[in-house]
């Protein structure tokens, strides 16, 4: 997959951040960017993508990015492949602070899966990637299994001619291994 920073490049350089302290920022994706994002994310269409954000200092040398992503996308129904409209309006927050290489490496190794806990600050690096934050939010906000109204998945009642229908035993996770084992033992 293409890096989000290449699809929607909106990087706020570290040297520009002090001048942005507390300033509101609004960015819109161009038609070309929206087409590239739609292709990369498997969308039928991305009619609009806007990000509103505020960058402010947090602590002595940290920064906080409070944003809101607003997008109009069209996905394909997983059942019928009909277009399904998706209106997205999602807030996001990124906390950033400078970290030594050792701190960044230790943070990458630690895995804390507490969904209620606040996310730790991300390494600040050379600045704030507003575009990547917006596209991460878009990816998380999209319905992974969009369905058109009234679309219902109905498996075929019968198998094609000449093919025996699957039984409950056939679809069990280790059914194929059981068949191989029987063949190796000389059984049916």
Image (cartoon, rainbow, N blue to C red):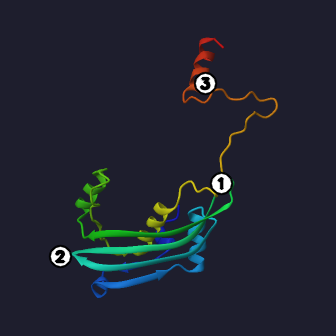
Distance from disc 1 to disc 2, alpha carbons, whole Å, reads 54 Å
Query: What residue sits 29% from the left and 88% below the top?
Result: 19
Where is residue 41 shown, x and y percent of the image?
Answer: 56, 63
**Residue 60 has which mark?**
2
- Residue depth check, mark 2 versus mark 3: number of the one nearer the observer: 3
| Residue under numbered circle 3 | 169
Give the distance between the C-alpha atoms of the residues marked 2 and 3, in whole angstroms: 63 Å
Q: Residues within 10 Å of mark 3 (few under 14, many from 20)?
A: few
Label drawn at residue 150:
1
Badge 1 or badge 2: first in the primary sequence: 2
Q: Is residue 163 visible?
A: yes
Tell me the crowding category of disc 1: few under 14, some 14 to 19, or many 20 or more residues within 10 angstroms, Cα based: few
In the image as oriented, which residue stretches furthest toward the left?
Answer: 60
Instruction: Give me the residue at 33% from left, 74% from top.
Output: 65
| Helix, strand or loop for disc 3 | loop
In percent of width and height, residue 8 lies at 49, 74
The alpha-carbon separation of the residues under discs 3 and 1 comes to 31 Å
Residue at left offset 29%, top offset 74%: 64
Q: Secondary structure at mark 1?
A: loop
């Amino acid at each position: 997959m293409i890096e989000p920073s290449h699809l929607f490049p909106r990087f706020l350089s570290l040297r520009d951040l002090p001048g942005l302290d507390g300033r509101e920022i609004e960015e819109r994706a161009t038609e070309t960017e929206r087409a590239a994002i739609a292709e990369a994310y498997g969308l039928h269409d991305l009619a609009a993508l806007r990000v509103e954000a505020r960058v402010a200092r947090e602590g002595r040398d940290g920064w906080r990015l409070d944003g809101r992503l607003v997008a109009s996308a069209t996905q394909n129904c997983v059942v019928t492949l009909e277009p399904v409209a998706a209106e997205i309006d999602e807030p996001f927050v990124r906390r950033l602070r400078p970290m030594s290489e050792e701190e960044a490496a230790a943070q990458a190794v630690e895995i804390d899966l507490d969904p209620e806990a606040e996310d730790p600050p991300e390494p600040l690096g050379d600045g704030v990637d507003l575009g990547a934050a917006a596209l991460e939010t878009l990816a998380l906000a999209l319905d992974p299994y969009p369905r058109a109204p009234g679309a219902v998945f109905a498996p075929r009642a019968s198998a094609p001619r000449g093919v025996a229908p699957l039984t409950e035993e056939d679809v069990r996770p280790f059914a194929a291994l059981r068949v191989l084992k029987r063949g190796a033992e000389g059984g049916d």
